[in-house]
Amino acid sequence: MLGELTDLGPFFAIRAHPRGTPPVPPWRPVTELTGPSRVLRARIESVRAVLATRGGLAATDVEPRAAASAVHLGMVARMTAPALGAAVLGCPLDLRPNGLWWQDVIGGPVPLSVPLLADGRAPADGPVTADWDRRLLEELVAPFTAAVAGESRVSGRVLWGNVASAVNSAAAQVAARRPDLAPAARQAARRLFASPLLRTERHPPGPAFRRSSCCLCYRLAPGTPAAVCGDCVLATVRQPDCES
């Protein structure tokens, strides 16, 4: 099943480690990111520097908010994709922060590793848990989102818009790689969108989804159409409206 997840795309790929063992570098505990921390602040600054280099800008030209949102969007995409994929494939995946590991690398999907089950089986060898959506959003995504908000001036509407965008994107990737799983992927996305945490989103998941906020990436190149994401609210409203 872990191989089937990998086949869905790089954001779905997941590794496994023995439950209860401490992470060995370069692996680190995800709990570093689920509360205000030096590690999260350093991650945001590292991404800020990379964004500046890629854009030919000075680091001070990249708004801390844009860097923080980029960190958040990348991580929630990494968290939601394997959870949605596992639900679609009908297998469990323990993404609770206390057992989840990550690697602090820049560029590409962040490596993630989940704990093995108690009997040593890979976490994709049994039935999916009934409350996988609540566990994902309330126990992992919400604390991480609150931590990013605490380290930056990014509004909750923008951050939860990032989550909605990541969920919709994950379902679209499943449908593209495995058309036979498209109905189940859409159902899983709708289940996540039904959470009160995503109540600010006005549009349901699907090909026509458009988020109700902006991830702030356009701030890296104001006035450049290519800097606006495909599902961004900026396609229909003026720029000042996107940041509320």
Image (cartoon, rainbow, N blue to C red):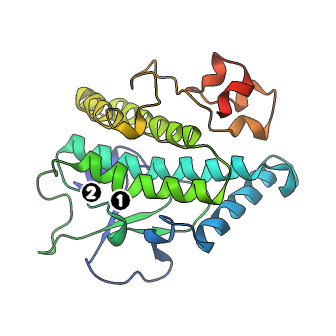
Answer with the quarter of the image where residue 187 lies: top left
Disc 1 element:
loop
Along the line of sight, which residue is nearer the eye, 40 or 126?
40
- Looking at the rendered structure, the kind of residue marked 1 is Ile
Question: CB atoms at circles 2 and 1 under 8 Å apart?
Answer: yes
Q: Which residue is mark 2?
A: 2
Name the residue located 46 percent from the left edge and 67 percent from the top edge: 102
Q: Position of residue 126 (x, y in %)?
A: 11, 57
- Asked if 150 appears above or below 178 in the picture, the reply is below
Q: Quadrant of residue 175?
A: top left
Q: Percent from the top left, x then y, of residue 63? A: 78, 49
Residue 6 visible in the snapshot: no
- The answer to whether 153 appears left or right of 142 in the picture is right
Q: Which of the labelled discs sits on residue 71, or is there none? A: none
Residue 90 visible, this angle: yes
Q: Is residue 16 left or right of residue 75?
A: left
Q: Which mark is residue 14?
A: 1
Alpha carbon distance from label 2 to label 1: 7 Å
- Left or right: residue 239 versus residue 30 is right
Q: Is residue 130 left or right of residue 16?
A: left
Q: Residue at x 23, y 31 (%)?
A: 184
Considering only order in the chain, which callout, 1 or 2, is on the residue closer to the N terminus?
2
Residue 54, image x, y percentages: 77, 50
- Residue 214, placed above or below residue 149: above
Quarter of the figure with the N terminus: bottom left
In the image, residue 86 sits, relative to residue 124, either above or below, namely: above
